[in-house]
């Protein structure tokens, strides 16, 4: 009789417990997906005005501040959803064309995001007005970086950016980073390319150094895995609570 009473207690709580676990999984995923989404633009001023209310150089300066502070989300916020970025010149397997803000963000995450320290100085800044809402900016970056992926890096980069003014303020639609010089201490020491940026190894084998293919599993599956872990832990706690309740019920008077 005691066992039947305990079984009835478990069966009554089974459905609510299942519902609670499902809600926990959904809630954890929504929270993680929201938390991992790129942050909003760090531009100090944006407007829905048809004409620019701030100079494009202000946006360029903030972009470079985010670059120096290794703020990948802040940099990504300056690109339109369909922006195009080209890295060319002496930059190994990372040379290529990166279309859409998602791929651009991933490029910065695997380069700038690997930096321990980063010091980039801008020189030879110039602008060319194409229209009231479109301006081309050109400048040169002299960079010193300490990277966990490439060691000590010295680079000189010629940058060309096309900025468009819109409801989000100034944003980049097209950009070209032409690496004039690029020197890595890991490469100088003969450390295999795969230990720095795996794309270099792919390119040496004749493959396409596509960052998205390399990172797609961990990039997209992370929130699901984290949500599963939270749900599993919550399920253990709920199961222990259920056992406690069923034991108390089995010790009560038999009806």
Image (cartoon, helix red, strand yellow):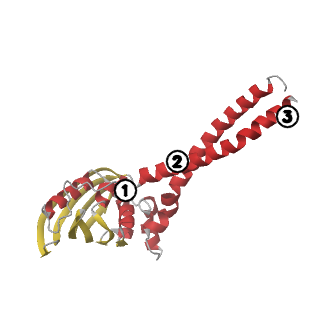
The residue that mark 2 highlights is 28
Q: Considering the image in quadrants, where does the N terminus appear?
A: top right
- Depth check, mark 2 against mark 1: the one in front is 2
Q: What is the total number of numbered labels drawn onto the structure image?
A: 3
Residue 151, can we see it?
no
The residue that mark 1 highlights is 38
- Depth check, mark 2 against mark 3: the one in front is 3
Closest to the observer, 255 or 208: 255
Q: Earlier in the sequence, mark 1 or mark 3?
A: 3
Percent position of residue 92, x then y: 36, 69
Task: Give residue 49's quadrant in the image.
Answer: bottom left
Give the residue displayed 50% in from the left and 60% down from the top: 220
Report how far apart the C-alphas of labels 2 and 3 lie in the structure.
Answer: 36 Å
Task: Give residue 131's quadrant in the image.
Answer: bottom left
Report how far apart the C-alphas of labels 2 and 1 lie in the structure.
Answer: 18 Å
Query: Vertically, is 245 above or below 224?
Result: above
Percent position of residue 80, x then y: 30, 67
The residue that mark 3 highlights is 4
Residue 36, can we see it?
yes
């Amino acid at each position: 009789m005691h066992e039947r009473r305990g079984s009835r207690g478990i069966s009554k709580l089974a459905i609510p417990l299942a519902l609670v676990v499902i809600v926990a999984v959904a809630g954890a995923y929504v929270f993680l997906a929201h938390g991992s989404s790129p942050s909003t633009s760090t531009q100090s001023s944006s407007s829905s005005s048809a004409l620019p209310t701030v100079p494009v150089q202000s946006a360029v300066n903030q972009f470079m501040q985010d670059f120096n502070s290794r703020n990948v989300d802040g940099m990504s916020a300056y690109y339109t959803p369909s922006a195009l970025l080209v890295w060319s010149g002496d930059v190994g397997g990372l040379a290529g064309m990166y279309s859409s803000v998602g791929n651009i963000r991933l490029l910065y995450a695997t380069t700038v995001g690997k930096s321990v320290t980063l010091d980039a100085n801008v020189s030879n800044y110039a602008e060319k007005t194409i229209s009231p809402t479109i301006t081309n900016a050109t400048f040169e970056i002299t960079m010193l970086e300490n990277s966990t992926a490439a060691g000590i890096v010295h680079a000189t980069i010629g940058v060309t950016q096309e900025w468009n003014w819109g409801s989000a303020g100034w944003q980049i639609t097209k950009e070209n980073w032409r690496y004039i010089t690029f020197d890595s201490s890991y490469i100088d020491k003969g450390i295999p390319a795969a230990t720095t940026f795996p794309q270099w190894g792919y390119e040496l084998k004749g493959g396409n150094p596509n960052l998205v293919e390399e990172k797609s599993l961990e990039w997209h599956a992370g929130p699901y895995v984290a949500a599963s872990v939270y749900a599993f832990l919550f399920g253990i706690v709920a199961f222990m609570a259920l056992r406690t309740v069923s034991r108390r019920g089995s010790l009560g008077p038999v009806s």
